[in-house]
Image (spheres, rainbow, N blue to C red):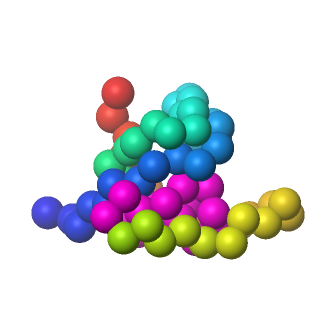
Amino acid sequence: MSEKRQVEWLEPVKIGRIQLEEGDRSTLVKAEADQYIGAGWCKCVETGEVGERSTKPVKMQVDDTFLMLA
């Protein structure tokens, strides 16, 4: 089973068809969570880690193994 991280969103974001609001929490595959944390979009609930938010576009690594089930 893949490692997971729980994150808290710091701003509204839309990822595909999923709309997330500030304060929402999600449990994600670690590799996906790490990208969003690094971009400053959310913080790790366990550690409080958050990256520096940039106003410039952020290139994300797409991986077919990332799944969000509704």
Note whether 28 is above or below 4 in the view shown: above
Which quadrant of the rendered structure holds the N terminus? bottom left
Task: Estimate the x, y position of residue 44 in percent, counting from the top left.
Answer: 41, 62
Residue 63 is at least partly visible in this image: no
Residue 13 in the figure: left or right of residue 24: right
Note whether 59 is above or below 70 in the view shown: below
Task: Estimate the x, y position of residue 2 in percent, counting from the top left.
Answer: 21, 65
* Magenta-colored stretch includes residue 31: yes
**Highlighted magenta segment, given as a residue range:** 29-46
Rendered residue at 49%/60% (across/down): 43
Quadrant of the rendered structure where residue 6 is? Answer: bottom left
* Magenta-colored stretch includes residue 58: no
Task: Estimate the x, y position of residue 31 in percent, counting from the top left.
Answer: 41, 68
Rendered residue at 54%/34% (across/down): 20
Task: Estimate the x, y position of residue 17 in percent, counting from the top left.
Answer: 56, 29
Please state which of residues 2 and 34 is positioned toward the viewer in this rendering. 34
Rendered residue at 57%/33% (across/down): 21
Residue 26 is at least partly visible in this image: yes
Rendered residue at 54%/55% (across/down): 42
Q: Residue furthest left?
A: 1
Residue 59 in the figure: left or right of residue 7: right
Tell how many labels: 0
Note whether 55 is above or below 70 in the view shown: below
Residue 54 in the figure: left or right of residue 11: right
Which quadrant of the rendered structure holds the C terminus? top left
Q: Residue furthest right?
A: 56
Residue 25 in the figure: left or right of residue 1: right
